[in-house]
Amino acid sequence: MFVCLAIPGKVVDIENNKEHAFVDYGEGTKRKVNISLVNVKVGDYVLVHAGFAIEVLNKKEARETIALFREMLSFEEVK
């Protein structure tokens, strides 16, 4: 069985072509993402799957989701 995840991140820069943006996932991790499926601006939070922003999140929802991811990752570090 495969599980696919959409990871939340914050849009920190949008390229001039308006098709790609740089998304900050926290702790210095930033990646280029295709934003052609959503309407975003710098400062928005998005869910990213397979290199595409697939949904815009409200700030509260995004921060809650990011906190859950960090909590899950902290359990992994204990092993």
Image (cartoon, rainbow, N blue to C red):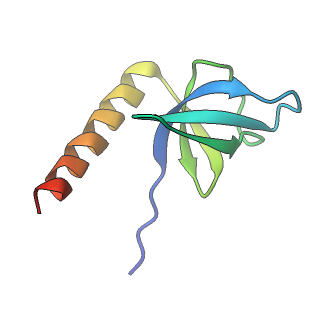
Quarter of the rendering containing residue 34: top right
Among all residues in the image, which is located at the extreme left?
78
On screen, residue 17 versus residue 73, left or right, reads: right
Q: Report the residue at 58% width, 39% height from top.
A: 55
Instruction: In the rendered view, tell whether residue 30 sits above or below residue 6.
Output: above
Residue 10: x, y in percent? 53, 28
Quarter of the rendering containing residue 2: bottom left
Instruction: In the rendered view, tell whether residue 11 sits above or below residue 70.
Output: above
Q: Quadrant of the N terminus?
A: bottom left
Name the residue nearer the viewer: 31 or 58: 31
Residue 79: x, y in percent? 11, 63
Residue 72: x, y in percent? 22, 49
Instruction: In the rendered view, tell whether residue 16 sits above or below residue 47.
Output: above
Q: Report the residue at 46% width, 46% height from top.
A: 7
Residue 40: x, y in percent? 68, 26
Quarter of the rendering containing residue 63: top left
Name the residue nearer the viewer: 46 or 76: 76
**Count of labels shown?**
0
Q: Report the residue at 60% width, 58% height from top.
A: 50
Among all residues in the image, which is located at the extreme right?
17
Among all residues in the image, which is located at the extreme front?
28
Q: Report the residue at 72% width, 29% height from top.
A: 39
On screen, residue 3 versus residue 50, left or right, reads: left
Name the residue nearer the viewer: 1 or 28: 28
